[in-house]
Image (cartoon, helix red, strand yellow):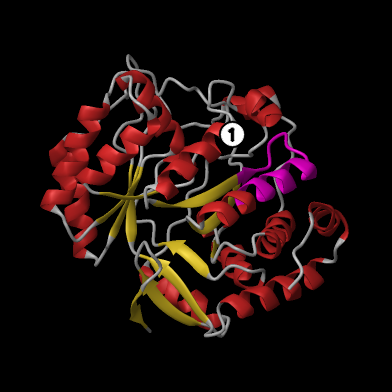
Amino acid sequence: MQRLTKEEALDLIKNSDLKTLGKMATKRKKELHPDGVTTFVVDRNINYTNICWVDCKFCAFYRHEKDADAYVLTYDEIDAKIDELLEIGGTQILFQGGVHPKLKIEWYEDLVEHIHTKYPQITIHGFSSIEIDFIAKVSRISVKEVLERLKAKGLASIPGAGAEILSDKVRDIIAPKKIDSEVWIGIHREAHKLGIKSTATMMYGTVESDEDIVEHFDMIRKLQDETGGFRAFIMWSFQGKNTELLAQIPDMPKPSSNRYLRLLAVARLYLDNVPNIQSSWVTQGAYIGQMALHFGANDLGSTMMEENVVSSAGASYKMAKEELIHLIRDVGEKPAIRDTAYNILERF
């Protein structure tokens, strides 16, 4: 199959009929996943701290060290969350925090080792590229050494958080203290070289253009051509409630469901080398989350036992395992629980 060019992707975003896009993305999805199985994982987000110095304007979750509601979770608090996850058959924690200004590599090594030793059956999918970058800086070591040391203690894979839009002119507006696009790509490249798989993400709906979105897709596709290290792509729309960015630009239009499905379909077509596309029902709701299965998504992400970041910004959808199974069956596909590596654990 001939690859979509950047110009063709841009034309699809701007001009294509939505139904046609859905058919194109579904065709591509079926080529990659001919068995008609739609997966999800039973996991929990654990945000070990909300203390962060990066002050992203689109984030309502972060606090500064001296704020009354700032926290760093204790081992006992983390263990209690994992115990609750195990009770419902969970297999993964998505483990990330704010970018704490003082915590060094030894703190993270001890924490990962503690979880991995006490809960060897739990996969630790953790630490965004900006956390890894700052751990390296504050510890005065390389990104490679951070990744090697955390992998040695039990880190299995890293999430794609912090990508937002991989365009520095956009990042300079919405998160001026954050790492730039090439650094984000570089950290994922380093992880992939060390055998640490990751996911790729995109948060759209702020100040980016269609051209910025296509450039983002292209950077992901190029790194995947090089390393093959991305397991999945996850995309969601900006959630503005309680954020500085919406206060600064109060008339910013809220991205429509049409826009979400359109971009998701083009992502499935452009990212021909990324095996899995997740639906973000957490930000879009159950109906559009389900509709995404007709626009290229083959995975419903997570049961999301706990989620603190986008809920701080106004998105508060929750879903039990049974609801996800129903949504998948309702569109004629076969539900299955997977692990972090997309191995099927249970079919329904």
Query: Among all residues in the image, which is located at the extreme top?
Result: 66
| Residue 239 seen anywhere in this rendered image of the structure | yes
Q: Amino acid at mark 1?
A: Glu
Q: Position of residue 175 (x, y in %)?
A: 58, 26
Q: Position of residue 66 (x, y in %)?
A: 32, 14
Density class for disc 1 (Cα within 10 Å; few <14, some 14-19, many ≥20) is few
| Residue 313 seen anywhere in this rendered image of the structure | no
**Left or right: 307 as drawn, with respect to 331:** left
- At x 34%, y 24%, the residue is 100
**Left or right: 29 as drawn, with respect to 337:** right
Specify start and end residues of the magenta stretch as a single range: 203-220
- Secondary structure under tag 1 reads helix
- At x 21%, y 36%, the residue is 109
Q: 267 above or below 253?
A: below
Q: Which residue is mark 1?
A: 182
Locate the C terminus by quadrant: bottom left
Q: 17 above or below 73?
A: below
Locate the N terminus by quadrant: bottom right
Q: Position of residue 243 (x, y in %)?
A: 56, 29
- Prevailing secondary structure class for the magenta stretch in the rendered image: helix
Q: Which residue is more in the foreground, 87 or 41?
A: 41
Q: Position of residue 221 (x, y in %)?
A: 63, 53
**Left or right: 144 as drawn, with respect to 332:** left
Residue 43 drawn in magenta? no
- At x 67%, y 50%, the residue is 217
Determine the image quadrant of residue 9. Answer: bottom right
Determine the image quadrant of residue 181. Answer: top right
- At x 30%, y 21%, the residue is 139
How many badges with numbers are in the image? 1
Residue 214 drawn in magenta? yes
